[in-house]
Image (cartoon, rainbow, N blue to C red):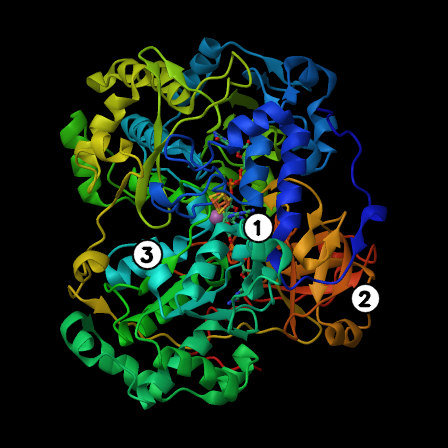
Amino acid sequence: MSKRTHEFTEDDLHRGPAKDTAGGPTAVAVSMRRSLEHMGPIRTARTLLKLNQADGFDCMSCAWPDPDPGERATAEFCENGAKAVAEEATKARATPEFFARHSVAELDAHSEWWLGQQGRITHPMVRRPDATHYEPIGWDEAFRLIASELDGLESPDDATFYTSGRASNEAAFAYQLFVRAFGTNNLPDCSNMCHESTSIALQESIGIGKASVTLPDLLGAELIVIAGQNPGTNHPRMLTQLEHAKQNGATILTINPLREAGLNRFKNPQTPRGVVGNGTRLSDMHLPIRVNGDIALFQAIGSLLVEWDALDHPFLERYTHGFAEWRDHVADVDWDVVTEATGLTRGQITDAAALLRDSRSTVFCWAMGLTQHRNGVATIKELVNLALAQGNIGKPGAGLFPVRGHSNVQGDRTMGIWERVPQSFLDSLQREFGFDPPREHGFDTVDSIRAMRDGKVRVFVGLGGNFVQAAPDTDVTAAALRNTLLSVQISTKLNRSHLVGGRTALILPTLGRTERDVQESGPQAITVEDSTCSVHSSRGPLQPASPHLRSEVSIITGMAEATLGDRYGIDWSGMRADYRRIRDHISRVVPGCESYEVNARRPGGFILPHPPRDSRTFDTASGRGEFEVSPIEVVQVPEGHLLLQTLRSHDQFNTTIYGYSDRYRGIEGGRHVVFAHREDIAALGFADGDHVDLVTRWDGDEHVRCAQGFRLVAYDVPRGTAAAYYPETNPLVPLDATARKSNQPASKSVVVRLTVAGEVDCDPAGVQGAVGGDWLHKSRPEVAHLS
Ligand SMILES: Nc1nc2c(c(=O)[nH]1)N[C@H]1C(S)=C(S)[C@@H](COP(=O)(O)OP(=O)(O)OC[C@H]3O[C@@H](n4cnc5c(=O)[nH]c(N)nc54)[C@H](O)[C@@H]3O)O[C@H]1N2
Ligand SMILES: Nc1nc2c(c(=O)[nH]1)N[C@H]1C(S)=C(S)[C@@H](COP(=O)(O)OP(=O)(O)OC[C@H]3O[C@@H](n4cnc5c(=O)[nH]c(N)nc54)[C@H](O)[C@@H]3O)O[C@H]1N2
Ligand code: SF4
Ligand SMILES: [Mo]
């Protein structure tokens, strides 16, 4: 395995036509090439044959569910699952010698891709105050250092404890226990930036923030609506299930500003037809919606369903609340506002509504295209309104399906990683462990950044993730992290967040999912939960990347022992020695997890209870499914500006850049591209291929945000909108531009202006005409019209 040392330059950028089909033999070829490059043949065989098998390990990439054990294929994974495995099980190593050779400043000059290529971190490392380099540190000294910084804080609330959604249930449970025993609910997580709008909307409208479907529901649906999601890249095995659903007679309606290849057509590489034929057409109808137009679309569809009386009246009467208000509201929908907000014609919307009318069971799938907007919560509630109107909750083949991102982001929440966990959960913790946990809500991700920026939070601990790249407003977030006394990152691989730490910065290297986890009592398994509330166990096959690595559970319990001593008599070393002890606690603390050990360790695991799905029971204010009336709000995009959404390429996992090939969109060898409509490009005085910078300004802020060095790509996006990759565009997302109620960064609707590259020095005074004001009309009247 050779470490790549050269960086991609602009000359590497190569553009071809966008594809209209996902999967096929190329997907297999790419999986194999990347696997062999990083892992060699033996590790490739050892890992891929165990991936997503009942006796193997759970894919650490996305949270797509596995079929029942009896129905799994020998190769039950996709191209991007294989890439995730290769990235973790790589033979490359970032050793103490590597850190001695490169100063932090030198490392910081490299791309995120290059940092990842340096391989697995082998030793605990520390960058001491004013040092230029990281140096090795012993585990005990590292724990003592953490304990002494935490101990020196005025209040436990002066520390914040972030979690990325890859942590196991066992690690997550132990972590929240440590943090609450320490005395704070400051437990921000990646979910705050991901499906937080979903969690809030579903909690309020159906009483539980999770999907109301299982895999068989998807397979049995008459209609599948996929809004704001790009499964061909981000949940590739979903395409296999969609193909099966189509074979069972399903119709698919897709709603997306982009005609993503995976939504259109799929060649299943495991079938002969997928290798030599044209594959299967997936989407029967595609709505190329304007960015953030979904709430208008859903209300317009609602008005037609009401007009046609395509409603489930018995369900409405028995199980819902607020229907009449919603009916009157949507009946009044202003079609001029709708067509302008959506960029769709009345005819297109009517055809789509007819699909809902004619379906007896509809599954609604969505992801970041709906959540990452200022009105993300209202948008999702509007989708729930449609589901309630037709009784599509709690019956076979129907339901709400927020498709989760990180493989265990949902499980982490179930285990109590949540800054505003319900009081009942805290009561259970108190009963089990005999201490009174803090009761006030803690800081979420955005509030943690504010608190670090303002010098209130002085210690940052990250259980996985890459905070500085994932969070909005990169410069602000970086300054906030640098403002801390101590930053601790529990990580597998090097990333930018290690280079912008606090006065003292620690990297604690940990085992990944692919690796064997052996503790005092023997080999350990961990458990995880997927998007459909299915919980199962996972066990890695490989020898750890270095003998100095510790498991996440071991690191967390080590920090806890050093910090808390024997406070409250919690048996940290017992939990570390045998994870069954943690699962035993889980069985008594976490609702729905009774007999956890037996159920979760059974092949295929078990499904957590979900009252609306199981019995049409709604734990809401009214005890029924809640309709909510929301105004149609539309982002104001002034002359000369575009509405930018930030999305993922086919060759990354969030901030981890696997490579520079966004194959389905025809982009190779570069990531600094902005997709815009050909006519907008011309109208703004540019040409396809021009070099541009992106600038924006937020709400009277003097500071102008810039992202520099992009190439314009003429692409099939709705007029007035643009798309570019995350995380490169995060410097443009203002910290305060968050969704109402969920405080989730609105990273899919950023108003930007294009400028000639280099024209602007990114100094506030230098930028004329970047849009000012809260473009999402904080103080506007109830129904906002486009200007
Ligand atoms: N390979 C791979 N897999 C992943 C990830 C990864 O980075 N790489 N990330 C994981 C994580 S954490 C997550 S959360 C998921 C993310 O999965 P997705 O949500 O599918 O990812 P995104 O690329 O952010 O964008 C989703 C889609 O939303 C569309 N969209 C943008 N704005 C709008 C809008 O206003 N309305 C509508 N209707 N659509 C819109 C975009 O065109 C895009 O197709 O994937 C998970 N899986
Ligand atoms: N502009 C914009 N910003 C976004 C988004 C967007 O669409 N647009 N999406 C948001 C979303 S949906 C999410 S989920 C967040 C993602 O935010 P994060 O979860 O913080 O980011 P990741 O890139 O997934 O984290 C990658 C790092 O995790 C570490 N890691 C990998 N595996 C393991 C492991 O097994 N254990 C431990 N301890 N560490 C490990 C590695 O060091 C790696 O560098 O970003 C958000 N930010
Ligand atoms: S669909 Fe997601 S969980 Fe399944 S193999 Fe692919 S990346 Fe992994
Ligand atoms: Mo996510």
Identify the residue under disc 1.
269
Viewer-closest of 60 and 327 = 60
Q: Earlier in the sequence, mark 3 or mark 1?
A: 3
Residue type pointed to by label 1: Pro
Q: Quadrant of residue 334?
A: bottom left
Foreground mark, 2 or 1, reads 1
Residue drawn 41% across the image and 79% down it: 355
Q: Quadrant of residue 299?
A: bottom left
Residue 483, position as x, y percentages in the image:
55, 33
Identify the residue under disc 2.
688
Residue 204, position as x, y percentages in the image:
27, 61
> Height in image: 405 above or below 7?
below
Residue drawn 57% across the image and 80% down it: 343
Residue 293, position as x, y percentages in the image:
51, 73
Viewer-closest of 502 and 217 = 217
Separation (CA) of disc 2 from disc 1: 35 Å
- State whether residue 783 appears in this view: no
Residue drawn 54% across the image and 86% down it: 345
Q: Is residue 309 left or right of residue 78?
A: left
Foreground mark, 2 or 3, reads 3
- State whether residue 308 appears in this view: yes
The label on residue 216 is: 3
Q: Is residue 473 left or right of residue 663?
A: left
